[in-house]
Image (cartoon, rainbow, N blue to C red):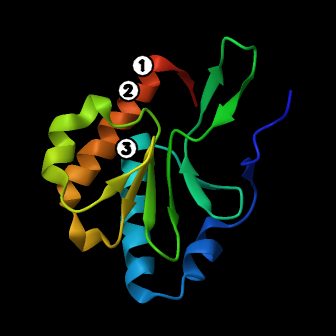
Amino acid sequence: MAENKTQRNKASVTAFLSAIEDRQKKSDAKKIAAMMRRASGSRASMWGTAIVGFGSYHYKYASGREGDYFLVGFSPRKQNLVVYIMPGFKDFAVLMKKLGKYKTGKSCLYINKLEDVDESILEQLIDRSVKLMRKRYETK
C-alpha cells in the first residue's frame, strides 16, 4: 500500500512561518496557530512542505489502508489561508452560518484573510472539530 504523500517531518514551523513574506498573512497564520494549539493541546509540526499540523490521529479504512494524519492544521498559501477541518463541515452548520466570508472543500476552509471571518467562531469551529476527531479516532 502506498503511504500518504503528506508526512510529518522535522522541519521548523517557526522558520516556515517566519518566511511568509506577506505581513498580514504571517500575522493571520500565527493567530490560527495559537487557536489550534489551544484546541489540540499539541505543539505544531510541519506536514509536507507547507502544512502546519497539530496532534495526530490514526485512521483505518475498510480497504485495509491505514495511517496517521494531523488532527487539525492550516496552510498559509499565496492565494488564501487553508484551514483543515478534518471531519468536514456537516456537523458544524450553525457555526458555518455565523463564520463570515469563506469557501469550503471537503475538509478545507478557504479564507482570504482572518478579518473576513469572526475569529471567535473560527476558534469554536477548530475546537469542536478537534473534539469530534477525538471521539471518532485514536488520537495523539
Per the image, label 1 sits on a secondary structure element best described as: helix
Place of residue 57 in the rendered image (x, y in percent of width and height, measured from the top left): 58, 30
Badge number at residue 39: 3
Badge number at residue 132: 2
Place of residue 11 in the rendered image (x, y in percent of width and height, measured from the top left): 73, 64
Q: Are marks 3 and 2 in contact (CB under 8 Å)?
A: no
Residue found 37% across the figure and 26% down from its top: 132
Q: Are marks 2 and 1 in contact (CB under 8 Å)?
A: yes
* Type of amino acid at the residue the image marks with label 2: Leu
CA gap between label 3 and label 2 equals 12 Å
Place of residue 116 in the rendered image (x, y in percent of width and height, measured from the top left): 23, 69
Left or right side of 96 for 90: right
Query: Callout 2 environment at 10 Å: few (<14), some (14 to 19), or many (20+)?
Result: some
76 or 56: which is nearer to us? 76
Residue found 55% across the figure and 82% down from its top: 20
Per the image, label 2 sits on a secondary structure element best described as: helix
135 or 93: which is nearer to us? 93
Per the image, label 3 sits on a secondary structure element best described as: helix
Place of residue 102 in the rendered image (x, y in percent of width and height, measured from the top left): 29, 59
